[in-house]
Structures are given as structure tokens and as C-alpha cells.
Image (cartoon, rainbow, N blue to C red):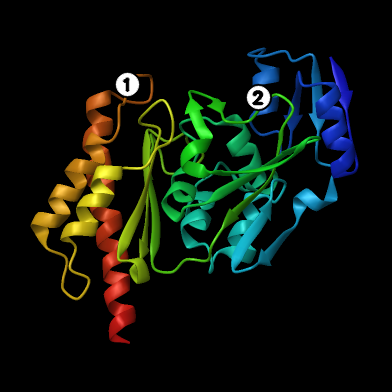
Amino acid sequence: MDFLRPTTWAEALTAKAERPDALPLQGGTDVMVELNFDVRRPAALLDLTGVAELAAWELVEGAYRIGAGVPYARIIDELGGELPGLAQAARTVGSPQIRNRGTVGGNLGAASPAGDSHPPLLAAGATVEVASAAGTRMIPASEFYLGVKRSALRPDELIRAVWIRPAAGPQYFSKVGTRNAMVIAVCSFALALHPAERRVGTGIGSAAPTPRRALEAEEFLAAELDWEARLDPGVLRRFGELAAAAASPIDDVRGTAGYRTHALAVLARRTLTWAWNDYRKARAA
């Protein structure tokens, strides 16, 4: 196995162009586990930890551009107020050691349906910046996931950053696992209120071949949610049903399809209730 270690973004793109079979390594929290258990044996590893620009974030034209190498711990500490949904998800990732190494960029690259960062990225309408020696592409998060651990990345492309606007309203992330910490989600759900647009964004994790939005549930709320009133119990119940119906779960070692469907309905109702209570408190203040 060859080991490639560029120190600049230009070197990284050149290396990926010359060796499209090279597996990118960012935090290594997923890749190294697979290597240790001999799940995969790539021809080459492309270590991106030496590319300094990937470990930086900036505010550009009203959106946060978060480099693919920014670890979860920094998102929690430095961007938790502006990106609360993503920060909440980041807090549920592994142990402190994993949060200091793991990155949203690496989570996107792995494209696991159970990745914790995917639902809040979908709910917030994030965009993934990818690049190759031929140029740069911007891919909406909703179009990034193609199948189980398959993404829209081309063989010669690398993830450079994720773009996400500051929260315009309350955001929440919740997941169910076999224990409270250091656990892969049985299922997860993210919700983001966008009051100015009178809409709600959603994201489902670990309950389908890919992370996905609950589009019918979003459309239902766009038509039925009264932004000037209390949350109607009938609307809340139907939202939970539609959110669960958007999933296509399976039975596996972590849980059954039936349990996932039930849990998603509960998570959808809970996150909407929490977000709505925060929204009304902010309006009353």
C-alpha cells in the first residue's frame, strides 16, 4: 500500500488525479477501523491531514465555509451558536478523542447512512464543495448521497469544504442508540425551522440506504403549520407519521425496521416540539 502525504491543496489534487484509486484519509476514525479489521485494502492512502487550509473555517457572503479537516470538537466549541443542529450532532459522535479527530468532511466521504452529521446538513440545506484538478463543483447535500456508502464524488475528486448558513431559527438533532454515548445510531432525525421562509427542513439518518429528507413531511408543514399559533396536536402527529413514512429501514443487528419506523415518528414529534417551543419563546421575548 502506497502512502501519499501532500502538504498543499494543489499537491492533493495532483495526487488524486494521478492516483484516483487512493483512499483519502482525513481524521481516520472510519478508515483506520476498516483497515484494522481488513474490511478494505486500498492500493494507496492519501493523507490530507497535512493540508492546512482544510482545517480552517470562514464566513463567506453570509455562509460558513467549513474545511473538510475541521474536527467535530471545533465545530462544537467555535460554531455551536451559529450552527446548533450540526453541533448537537457532533456532540453525539464517539468519545472526546474521536471528536478531536473526526471531521464532517470525513463523514461525508464515508457516506454511511448512519453518519451523524448528515441529517443536520440536510435539514439546514448545506452544500458540499468538491474539487479535482479539472475544477470545482458545488453539490447540494440532498444530491450528495447515492447509495450505501456511495456519494456523488468522482474518482478524481476530493471534498474541500461544506457550506452552511447560520441558523435562521431553532434546530435540533436527536438519535436513538443502544446506549447514551459512543454508539452508532439505530436511527436519527434532524429538524431546522426557517421562519422567514415559513418552512421546516428535515434529515433522516440510519433508516434508509442513504441519509434523506422527509419531503412529504416538509410539504405538509408548509401547508398546515400556523406560525402565529401553538403547535396543533393533529399537525404534530401527522408530521411524525409522514417523517417515518419517508424512511425505508431494514432489520439489522442494531434494530428492526419496525422499531426504526416507530422511533423516527417519535423523534420527529419531539424535535418539532422542542424547536417550536424555542421559536415561540423567542417571539415572545
> Which corner quadrant holds the N terminus?
top right
Residue at x-position 53% and y-position 36%: 144
- Where in the figure is residue 215, as x and y percent of width and height? 30, 44
Q: What element carries label 1?
A: loop
Q: Which residue in the protein does label 2 denote?
A: 33
Inspect the image, locate mark 2, and give the three-letter code of the amino acid beneath it.
Val
Q: Which mark is residue 223?
A: none
The extreme front residue here reads 134
Write the residue at 65% across / 20% down: 34
Tell me if residue 98 can be seen.
no
Residue 59 percent across, percent down from the top left: 66, 67
Quarter where residue 36 is shown: top right
- Residue, x 84% and y 50% (percent of image)? 52
Question: Does residue 154 sit above or below 231 in this rendering?
Answer: above
- Can you see residue 223? yes
Q: How crowded is mark 2: few (under 14 residues within 10 Å), some or many (20 or more)?
A: few
Image quarter of residue 187: top left
Please indicate whether residue 227 sits to the left or right of residue 161 in the image.
Answer: left
Q: Above or below — where is 279 with respect to 50?
A: below
Q: Quadrant of residue 14?
A: top right
The label on residue 250 is 1
Residue 98 position, x and y percent, is 64, 42
Q: In this view, does 94 lie above or below 124?
A: above
